[in-house]
Amino acid sequence: MASLNLFNLSFLLSLLSSSNLSLWPRNHGEKVGVFPPTCNRIECPNYDVIHTGNGFEIRRYNSSTWISTSPIDDISFVGATRDGFLRLFSYIQGNNSDKRKIEMTAPVITEVKPSDGSFCASSFVVSFYVPKENQQNPPSAKDLHVQKWGLTYVAVRQFGGFVDDDEVGEEAAALYASIAGTIWSDAIDKSYSGGNATEYIVAQYNSPFEFRNRVNEIWLTFDLEDGFAI
Ligand SMILES: *[C@@H]1O[C@H](CO)[C@@H](O)[C@H](O)[C@H]1NC(C)=O
Ligand SMILES: *[C@@H]1O[C@H](CO)[C@@H](O)[C@H](O)[C@H]1NC(C)=O
Ligand SMILES: *[C@@H]1O[C@H](CO)[C@@H](O)[C@H](O)[C@H]1NC(C)=O
Ligand SMILES: *[C@@H]1O[C@H](CO)[C@@H](O)[C@H](O)[C@H]1NC(C)=O
C-alpha cells in the first residue's frame, strides 16, 4: 500500500468514513447535466447526453467494461459499498492474477436490489470502471467478475453532498417519479421486469476532501428498440 496516491487514499477514506455525514451540507437532487468535475482528472466512461428532461437526463454509453464484486447482502448501502470498494481497491493495487496495478477511475457504482421487507438485507454489487488501457484484458481475480456493457442508455438523476443510506432510496424514487409519463418510461419499465422497477445503480465520483461540487448519481439502465426516434 506504499504507493497510495492522494486520490486513492482520499477515496478510500471516503468510503470508510461513517454513513452519518449530516455535518456536511447536502444539495438534494436539483442538479441536472453537470459534468462530474472528477472526470477532468481521472478517466470516466464516455457518454453522450441525448435528452435533458425535468430532473433527469438520458445518456448513451457506447460500451464500457467494469470489474464487479459478487452480490453483497447487507442492510446498509454505505456498508456494502465500503466492503465492495475495499476489495476492488486491493484489486487495482495489484491483488489480481497478473499482480498488475490499475489506475483509479470514476465512478464507482453500486447496483442495488432492495429487499422486499424493511428489515431484510438488500443485495449490492459494487463495480469499478476499467480504464481503456486495461479493457481488452483485465486481470482476473477469483471473487470478482468482468461485466462488459454494450450500448447502454441510462436515465440519470444527480445529487450533491455525501451519500447516506436513507437518501439513496429517496433519490431513486425521485428519479422514477420524474420519468413517469415521459417518452422514456415504457423502455425503462421493460428493462425492469415489466414495471416492477425497484432496482437502481448509485454512481459516486468524489473523495471526502472535496466538500464542494460533489456529484453523485442514480442510474437506471435500459435498452431502446430499433426505430425509437430520439
Ligand atoms: C446522525 O447524526 C445526527 C446528528 O448528529 C443524528 O441526529 C442522527 O441520528 C445520526 N444518524 C445515524 C444514522 O447515526
Ligand atoms: C458513440 O458512437 C457514435 C456512433 O459511432 C459516435 O458518433 C459517438 O461519438 C460515440 N460517443 C462516444 C461518447 O464515444
Ligand atoms: C486479495 O484478494 C483476496 C481475494 O481474492 C482477498 O481474500 C484478500 O483479502 C486480498 N488481499 C488484500 C491484501 O486485500
Ligand atoms: C410485479 O410485482 C407484482 C407484485 O409484487 C407481481 O405479482 C408480478 O408478478 C411482478 N411482475 C413481474 C414481471 O415481475
Image: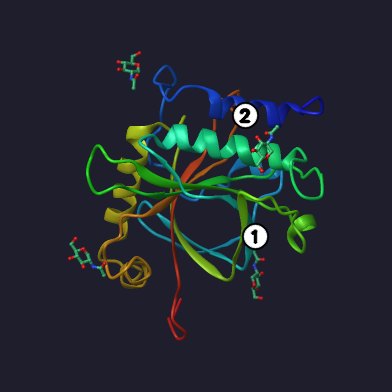
Of residue 112 and residue 34, the one placed in the foreground of this image is 112
Q: Which residue is mark 1?
A: 65
Badge 2: residue crowd in 10 Å (few <14, some 14–19, many ≥20) = some
Locate residue 200, reporting x and y percent. 40, 53
In the rendered structure, which amino acid carries the disc numbered 1?
A: Thr
- Residue 73 appears in the figure: yes
Residue in front for this viewpoint, 209 or 168? 168
Residue 220 lies, with reference to residue 125, above or below; the image says: below
> Is mark 1 in CB contact (under 8 Å) with mark 2?
no
* Residue 27 horizontal/vertical position (percent): 41, 32
The number of callouts visible is 2
Residue on which disc 2 sits: 12
Left or right for 137, reference 106: right
Q: Is residue 230 left or right of residue 205?
A: left
In the displayed structure, 107 sits above or below 191; it is above
- Quadrant showing the N terminus: top right
Residue located at (47% from left, 37% from top): 80
Residue at 41% across / 37% down in the picture? 77
SS label for mark 1: strand
Asked whether, in this view, residue 116 is left or right of residue 19, the answer is left
- Residue 165, relative to residue 126: is it above or below? above
- Tell me which residue sits at (25%, 66%) in the image: 181
Q: Position of residue 201 (x, y in %)?
A: 45, 51
User: Does the beta carbon at disc 1 come under 8 Å from ligand 2?
Assistant: no
